[in-house]
Image: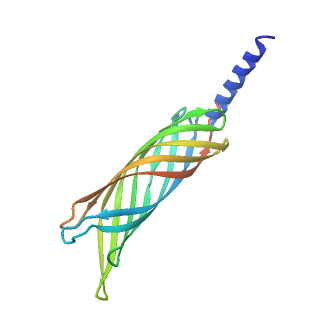
Amino acid sequence: MKNLFPSLTALWLCLAVSSSMAQTSKGTFLLGGSLGFSSGHSTSTYDYLSTPSKQKQSTISLAPNVSYFVIDRLSIGIVTPLSYTQYKREDIDQKTTYRSYSIGPLIRYYFPLGSHWAIFPEASYSYGWMETMGHYSINGDVFRQTFRGNARNLQGGLGLTYFLNPNIGLEGKFRYQSMRDTYNHAGLDHVDNNSFDFTIGVQVYLFRNTQ
């Protein structure tokens, strides 16, 4: 009898780990996405202005993805990040909107924490297209400019998943982004933007392999 409790404890741990790994077993498809929102202020310095220019910015990002577990806990797939940002300068009447769309590989690995939780590191790289549209007014006259180019987005982060059931997981993720926009316009080269943010998402685990 003295060995009964340790044996039952070991059995419970094995069942918990097996249950937590069911969603992330080899042969499972992963379909979902994440949503992020950020808002803040930035300051830009121009040669023709005596004082720095301040602007408010708000960003909404969406990242649909589809992956496949090539081995237990390791998924490889494709992500298609979309981003929309609006800038508004505080010193003059100028607004700028930024849109980008890209596609590229995604990889993540799960570390189970009991039967309902798991943490995962994740990395992705995507390449695509961007467009910046700005309009401003001078003495009542409105001027508009549009610039297009290519967008590169390198991301890395750490997330936490809660499995509602064997097929649905809710997750939150802290990530770091390194973005570069290269413009197809004379006089413009590229713009770099590095940031940290937090996203929330839902993932659906399909065709779980029970073999």
Coordinates of residue 27 in the picture (x, y in percent)? 57, 37
Q: Pick the residue in front: 145 or 150.
A: 145
Q: Residue at x 28, y 64 (%)?
A: 44
Is residue 180 shown left or right of residue 80? Answer: left
Q: Quadrant of residue 87?
A: bottom left
Is residue 100 shown left or right of residue 141? Answer: right
Q: Is residue 211 above or below residue 190?
A: above
Coordinates of residue 78 in the picture (x, y in percent)? 45, 48
Q: Is residue 59 above or below residue 155?
A: below
Q: Residue at x 25, y 59 (%)?
A: 190
- The C terminus sits in image quarter: top right
| Residue extending furthest toward the right | 1
Q: Residue at x 73, y 16 (%)?
A: 7
Q: Pick the residue in front: 203 or 6.
A: 6
| Residue extending furthest toward the bottom | 140
Residue 161 visible, this angle:
yes
Q: Quadrant of residue 4?
A: top right
Coordinates of residue 163 in the picture (x, y in percent)? 64, 42
Coordinates of residue 185 in the picture (x, y in percent)? 22, 67
Q: Is residue 194 above or below residue 68?
A: below
Residue 23 visible, this angle:
no
- The N terminus sits in image quarter: top right
Is residue 127 shown left or right of residue 64? Answer: left
Q: Residue at x 44, y 59 (%)?
A: 82
